[in-house]
Image (tube, rainbow, N blue to C red):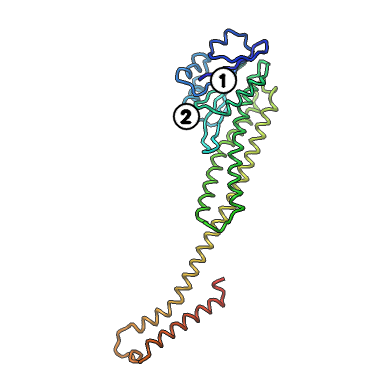
């Protein structure tokens, strides 16, 4: 589906249903949004706008890293939208021309819909107003990163305030899951930050000077997000080390207990082994109360060794 928003020379804002209707108005600038377009609509990128084949290929195939390419007077930007629930990435492409903006995304995006409403309510009337529309789209996309980052931060705070000693192995798995989410988020935030840095420092878009402070605001948001992600990764590193220490300590306690039991039973096994031999000349075998005497000796030996370990602090 294609939506078209146009600002006319007499400062009116009109919404059109097809690109052919642009010829019926004296247009200052316009925004054409390709939202989940059909194959026939996607062909208009070439048939109507005559964009570079490489840019069109980037739109139609594969998932591209955020980037900016310049083709004569058309500037091509690849942006990333993110799902708050799954942190999956979807591509949003922008073509910024002399007096138009073309946005292309293969799935409907609420961020683009919100940007559309904002531009519709308060459009820029000047010829380079399409740059402001591009800013609004990018701002909405980046703003959608914050709830995802804050949700992860809330999970980490639950770990820090909850009972850390219970379910160590399960919690350790959850910590690694959180780190995996942070890695996904970082793979989105850092390339977008690099893209905004290129946009702010490019000399190819002369009209950008009119909106430089707007794009600087987005760049500041991405810097903040980078700090949040790095801070959360540091916290998850501490949690991971903590739970691994707890797990190792628990394992040491188990091994110590088993070692104590083994050491106590070693002399008892030795005694039982001696009197389990079937030699004839063993005077103790003929004692009337020999069996009970050996049991008493073994019991005293076990209790004595346990008391000695206790005094040595083996059970502390």
Front residue of 57 and 102 = 102
Front residue of 2 and 188 = 2
- How many marks the image carries: the answer is 2
Which class describes the residues within 10 Å of circle 2: few (<14), some (14-19), or many (20+)?
A: few
If you read the primary sequence from the N terminus, does the residue marked by circle 1 or circle 2 appear first? 2
Front residue of 22 and 200 = 22
Circle 1 SS class = strand
Question: Picture coordinates of residue 303 (x, y %)?
Answer: 49, 80
Question: Picture coordinates of residue 59 (x, y %)?
Answer: 50, 24
Which class describes the residues within 10 Å of circle 1: few (<14), some (14-19), or many (20+)?
A: many
**82 above or below 33?**
below
Mark 1 vs mark 2: in front: 1
Circle 2 SS class = loop
Quarter assignment of residue 71: top right
Give the quarter of the figure containing the C terminus.
bottom right
**171 above or below 115?**
below
Front residue of 33 and 276 = 33
- Write the residue at 59% across / 54% down: 162
The circle on residue 136 is none
Left or right of 263 in this view: 31: right
- Write the residue at 52% across / 31% down: 90
Question: Picture coordinates of residue 148 (x, y %)?
Answer: 58, 39
- Write the residue at 52% across / 25% down: 105
Question: Picture coordinates of residue 150 (x, y %)?
Answer: 61, 41
Left or right of 19 in this view: 124: right
Q: Name the residue beneath numbered marker 2.
A: 62
Q: Quick one: which residue is furthest to the top in this view?
A: 24
Q: Name the residue beneath numbered marker 1.
A: 102
**Residues at marks 1 and 2, CA–CA distance in whole angstroms:** 19 Å
């Amino acid at each position: 589906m294609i939506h078209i928003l146009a600002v006319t020379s007499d400062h009116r804002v009109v919404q059109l249903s097809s690109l052919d209707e642009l010829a019926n108005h004296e247009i200052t600038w316009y925004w054409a949004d390709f939202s989940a377009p059909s194959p026939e609509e996607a062909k208009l990128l070439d048939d109507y706008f005559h964009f570079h084949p490489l840019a069109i290929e980037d739109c139609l195939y594969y998932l591209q890293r955020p980037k900016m390419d310049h083709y004569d007077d058309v500037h091509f930007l690849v942006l990333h939208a993110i799902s708050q629930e799954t942190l999956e990435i979807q591509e949003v492409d922008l073509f910024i021309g002399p007096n138009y903006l073309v946005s292309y995304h293969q799935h409907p995006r609420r961020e683009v819909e919100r940007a559309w409403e904002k531009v519709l309510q308060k459009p820029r009337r000047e010829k380079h107003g399409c740059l402001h529309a591009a800013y609004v789209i990018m701002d909405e996309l980046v703003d959608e990163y914050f709830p995802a980052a804050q949700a992860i931060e809330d999970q980490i705070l639950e770990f820090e305030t909850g009972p850390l000693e219970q379910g160590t192995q399960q919690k350790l798995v959850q910590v690694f899951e959180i780190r995996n989410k942070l890695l996904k988020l970082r793979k989105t935030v850092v390339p977008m930050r690099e893209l905004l840095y290129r946009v702010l420092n490019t000399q190819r878009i002369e009209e950008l000077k009119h909106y430089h402070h707007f794009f600087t605001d987005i760049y500041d948001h991405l810097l903040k997000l980078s700090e949040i992600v790095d801070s959360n990764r540091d916290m998850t590193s501490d949690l991971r080390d903590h739970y691994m220490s707890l797990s190792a300590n628990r394992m040491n306690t188990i091994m110590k207990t088993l070692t104590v039991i083994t050491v106590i039973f070693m002399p008892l096994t030795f005694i039982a082994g001696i009197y389990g031999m079937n030699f004839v000349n063993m005077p103790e075998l003929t004692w009337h109360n020999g069996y009970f005497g050996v049991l008493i000796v073994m019991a005293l030996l076990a209790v004595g060794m346990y008391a000695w370990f206790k005094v040595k602090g083996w059970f502390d």
